[in-house]
Image (cartoon, rainbow, N blue to C red):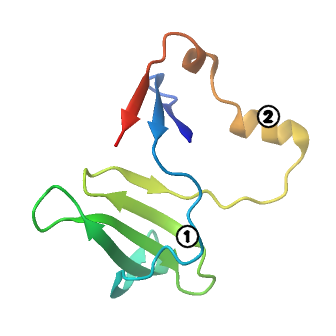
Amino acid sequence: ALLTFFHPLTKDCQIIKFGVGILPPNWLEGATYLGIEEVDSFQCNKWQKGDSDVPGMPFITYWDDVETRKPFQYQFFSGSLLKFVDFEPISEEEEKMVFQVPDYCFSGSEIEAVE
């Protein structure tokens, strides 16, 4: 899967070749449940799974909403924090405005392999 990360203020864009695709429904099997934690005013279940190359650090920490069980955010051992967007039905015009990758992402972007 190719993921595009961009930051509008700095016009920084990075396309990453990510070695995994869509996660199966049981991907949290074997994870350690750490309890409930408040994140951005939401009550979230917190999980950790996998070993990283950094001793004592889990590969991933994952939070989901206590009420809905929707994914909320996850953080890799590298410190990368990714928050999920909650998709609501919107018009086609709004979709173009919100989800269009900026033009600066299409010129000179290098693909970085993430192992």
Residue 26 or residue 73, whichever sits in front: 26
Q: Residues within 10 Å of mark 1 (few under 14, many from 20)?
A: some
Of residues 113 and 72, the one nearer the viewer is 113
> Identity of the amino acid at label 2?
Lys
In the figure, 2 relative to 58: above or below? Answer: above
- Please provide percent x and percent y for residue 39: 42, 72
Cα distance in 3D space between marks 2 and 1: 24 Å
Image height check: is 73 above or below 9? Answer: below
Q: Residue at x 50, y 32 (%)?
A: 6
Q: What secondary structure is marked by label 1?
A: strand
Residue drawn at 66 percent across, 61 percent down = 86
Task: Indicate which label's residue lies in the foreground, 2 or 1.
Answer: 1
Residue 97, percent from left and from top? 76, 34
Judge from the rendering whether residue 20 lies leftward or rightward of residue 91; answer left or right: left
Q: For mark 1, what is the residue?
A: 71
Q: Which one is in front, 38 or 3?
A: 3
Q: Which residue is mark 2?
A: 96
Q: Residue at x 82, y 41 (%)?
A: 94
Which amino acid lies under the numbered mark 1 shown in the image of this protein?
Pro
Q: Kindly give the residue lying farthest to the top in the view shown.
A: 108
Choose top left, top right, bottom left or bottom right for residue 31.
Answer: bottom left
